[in-house]
Image: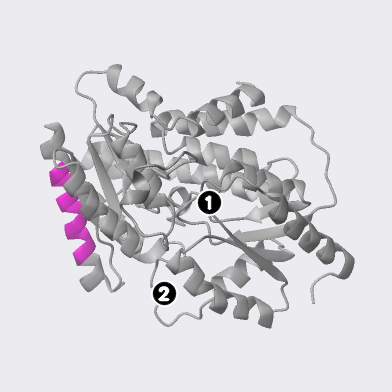
Amino acid sequence: MKLDSIIALCQGLYEDLGLESVKAWKEAGTGRKAIGYLPVYVPREIVHAAGMLPVGLMGGDMEIIRGDAYYQSYICHIPRSTIEMGVSGRLDSLDGVLFPSICDVIRNLSGMWKMMFPDKYAKYMDFPQNFDPEVGGKFYEGELRALQADLESLGGVTVTPDGLRESIALYNRNSELVLGLYDLRAEKPWQVPTSELYLLLRAGNILPVEEHNTLLEDYRAALEDVDRPELDNSRIILTGAFCEQPPLGLIRTIERAGCYVVEDDFVLGSRWLTAPVETEGDPIVNLSRAFLEHSVETASVYIGDKPKGAALVSKCRSREGEGVIFCAPSFCDPALLDQPMLASAIEREGIPYTEFKYAENTGQFQVIKEQTGTFSDSIKLWGQT
């Protein structure tokens, strides 16, 4: 598959706010069901093992009319666009939605969803904040088994241990392919534009994991046939966009302003686990242990006594980042409350940074282009301070 065709396919899926591809998948088989999920992370392996399609919901660039009537103006944008998609019928192809415990906004959205769509399955997914295997681990195992039982009842199926292990293996492969592209981008950021990588990640929200794995493999192979010029851009670490996603135009603007993004937290659910899930033994226990031991460090995860900002500094060093851009959605409490502590950590290391906020429907990027362009130029002119 040629590179242009791959990107065109991903672009089409990115713009598919009515989930037409999900409808087509359901119509291609008897009794198929699709389960939506909000950012950042859910155990998609269990949904897949139940024969259902996990569908990542990340809002979208659309006119919000009815959605604004349900939420205050001082919270982030994603719940309003999600409500708008629901009441406008765009999400009718979903048989249920999972709401992970990321913040109070998502918690409240789960309750709102249950009232607005009482005939649809909805579950608030609680994640452990105590990472002791005998405490948080046992709690999370219970949550996973409850989700499995719900999906079995909804789909009239039985999830077998072997079936769940097969799903885990598929998602392990998916994570391996995604992380491989991240490593290649860090090595040759001119060869793997972040705007393309972002579209590939977003495609993984919609496609069955088997098809997404093939698409990632095809993209990697197609890169061998292109030779892109290396530019004198600054190597940037971008952080803060782990939940509500930036519009594609914003990412392209950052690149055009002279920045190579060599690490980011876009579509973080596809890279939430930093090591493969074990495929031997009880798969539920393995999923729980993977969450406790290998969750990525982000603003929505309790890190105990670990020094705040150490992971960001480590990313800067390992990816040879020359500066950091704090790019967070407006009114995102987890990201914006973390930012001062993260900024202090990188300041102590002499790493320059800048920051701005966005909404998923931001349409004007000139100010951001000027700001990030100036930041990139200052790095090239004066280096790290």
> Three-letter amino acid code at disc 2?
Ile
Residue 303 got which mark? 2
Name the residue: 42% across, 44% down. Answer: 59
In the rendered structure, the answer to whether residue 63 lies left or right of residue 237 reads left
In the image, taking residue 94 as reference, residue 160 lies left or right, namely left
Q: Position of residue 81 (x, y in %)?
A: 40, 45
Disc 2 versus disc 1: nearer the observer:
1
Residue 119, image quadrant: top left
The x, y position of residue 95, in whole percent, is: 22, 34
For the C terminus, the image quarter is bottom right
Pointer 1: residues within 10 angstroms few (<14), some, or many (20+)?
many
Quick check: can you spot residue 7? yes
Would residue 19 be counted in the magenta stretch? Answer: no
The amino acid type found where label 1 is placed reads Phe
Residue under label 1, please give it.
Answer: 266
For the magenta stretch, what is the residue range? Answer: 139-150
Location of residue 169 with respect to 128 vertically, above or below: above
| The N terminus: image quadrant | top right
Q: Residue at x 80, y 61 (%)?
A: 374
> Which of the two labelled residues, at mark 2 and mark 1, occupies the earlier sequence position?
1
- Relative height, residue 22 to residue 311 (above, below): above
* Residue at 85% over, 52% down: 232
Considering the numbered disc 2 on the image, is that residue within a helix, a strand or a loop?
A: loop
- The figure's colour scheme reads one colour
- Provide the major secondary structure of the magenta segment: helix
Residue 37 picture location, percent across and down:
33, 45
Mark 2, other Cα within 10 Å: few <14 / some 14–19 / many ≥20: some
| Cα–Cα span, label 2 and label 1 | 20 Å
